[in-house]
């Protein structure tokens, strides 16, 4: 009788065909390089490229065709969310968004744009590697901390346009600057801000913006 495989024998190393290929995109060069090196050290994973902004990430993914694109949420030129939307229909590529901020709104927007994973940058390397392998296998993953916040989050009473405006208000933009950025009339911006103030029961546009940030709506 031919003996069967030894269950205690070490697993054979992954072949190139079996390897999970990953593109890592983050505008923080040191973090991007460190993360890429750590992932490359994990069995069965090979980082095939790095990008420092969202547009470069999209172009790199389309060229390299990785199994997974690991994209930072906040990047210049093209945000991680917008890059995710552009890659939504790329065959064979699954997008995982990573961020420092455990905010339910970011999770919702990432999933709406086609992400199949949402992780925090504090995720240990070994755990992240397992998540990426599971994602390639067709699973989805949301960081438990973010998922818990999403389940208990207060319902947002504001519309998308109001949230866009409050996000710019929180950056310190004037009414004219907000109007210019969103191609709106200054009076229209003031009306949106007044409506948000009334619905949130606060005293100013800045207070409305801060409350929206604290609740994770922007």
Image (tube, grey):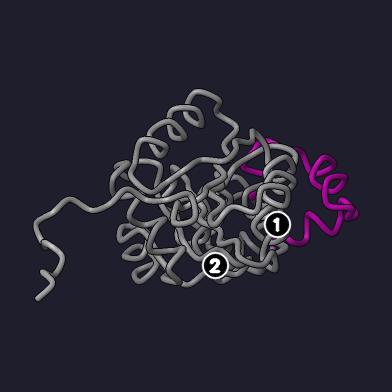
Please state which of residues 1 and 178 is positioned toward the viewer in this rendering: 1
Name the mark on residue 1.
Answer: none
First in sequence: mark 1 or mark 2?
2
Residue drawn at point x = 32 percent, y = 55 percent:
130
Please state which of residues 37 and 120 is positioned toward the viewer in this rendering: 37
Please state which of residues 39 and 31 is positioned toward the viewer in this rendering: 39
178 lies above or below 215: above
Residue drawn at point x = 66 percent, y = 47 percent:
64
Residue count near mark 2 (Cα–Cα under 10 Å), binned few <14, some 14–19, many ≥20: many
**Left or right: where 111 falls relative to 14:** right
Q: Secondary structure at mark 2?
A: helix
User: What secondary structure is the magenta-colored segment mainly?
Assistant: helix
Residue drawn at point x = 54 percent, y = 57 percent:
67
In this figure, which residue is indicated by the disc labeled 1?
A: 193
In percent of width and height, residue 121 lies at 40, 42
Q: Quadrant of the N terminus?
A: bottom left
Please state which of residues 189 and 142 is positioned toward the viewer in this rendering: 142
Q: Is residue 144 magenta?
A: no
In this figure, which residue is indicated by the disc labeled 2?
A: 111
Q: Quadrant of the C terminus?
A: bottom right
In percent of width and height, residue 35 lies at 43, 34
Q: CA distance from mark 1 to mark 2?
A: 28 Å
Q: Is residue 181 magenta?
A: yes
Residue positioned most to the top: 30
The magenta stretch is 167-194
85 lies above or below 157: above
**Left or right: where 90 falls relative to 66:** right
In percent of width and height, residue 120 lies at 39, 48
In percent of width and height, residue 196 lies at 64, 62
Residue count near mark 1 (Cα–Cα under 10 Å), binned few <14, some 14–19, many ≥20: many
């Amino acid at each position: 009788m031919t003996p069967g495989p030894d269950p205690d024998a070490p697993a054979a190393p992954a072949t190139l065909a079996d390897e999970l290929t990953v593109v890592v995109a983050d505008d923080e060069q040191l973090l991007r390089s460190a993360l890429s090196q750590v992932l490359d050290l994990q069995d069965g994973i090979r980082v095939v490229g790095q990008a420092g902004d969202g547009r470069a990430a999209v172009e790199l993914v389309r060229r390299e065709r990785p199994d997974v694109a690991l994209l930072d949420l906040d990047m210049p030129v093209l945000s991680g969310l917008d890059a995710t939307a552009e890659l939504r229909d790329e065959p064979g590529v699954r997008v995982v968004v990573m961020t420092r901020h455990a905010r339910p709104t970011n999770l919702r927007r990432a999933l709406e744009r086609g992400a199949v994973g949402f992780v925090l940058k504090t995720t240990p390397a070994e755990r992240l590697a397992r998540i990426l392998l599971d994602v390639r296998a067709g699973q989805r993953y949301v960081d438990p901390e973010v998922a818990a916040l999403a389940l208990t989050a207060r319902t947002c009473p504001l519309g998308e346009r109001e949230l866009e405006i409050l996000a710019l208000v929180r950056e310190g933009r004037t009414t004219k600057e907000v109007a210019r950025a969103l191609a709106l009339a200054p009076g229209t911006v003031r009306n949106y801000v007044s409506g948000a103030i009334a619905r949130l029961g606060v005293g100013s546009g800045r207070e409305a913006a801060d409350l929206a940030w604290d609740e994770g709506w922007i």
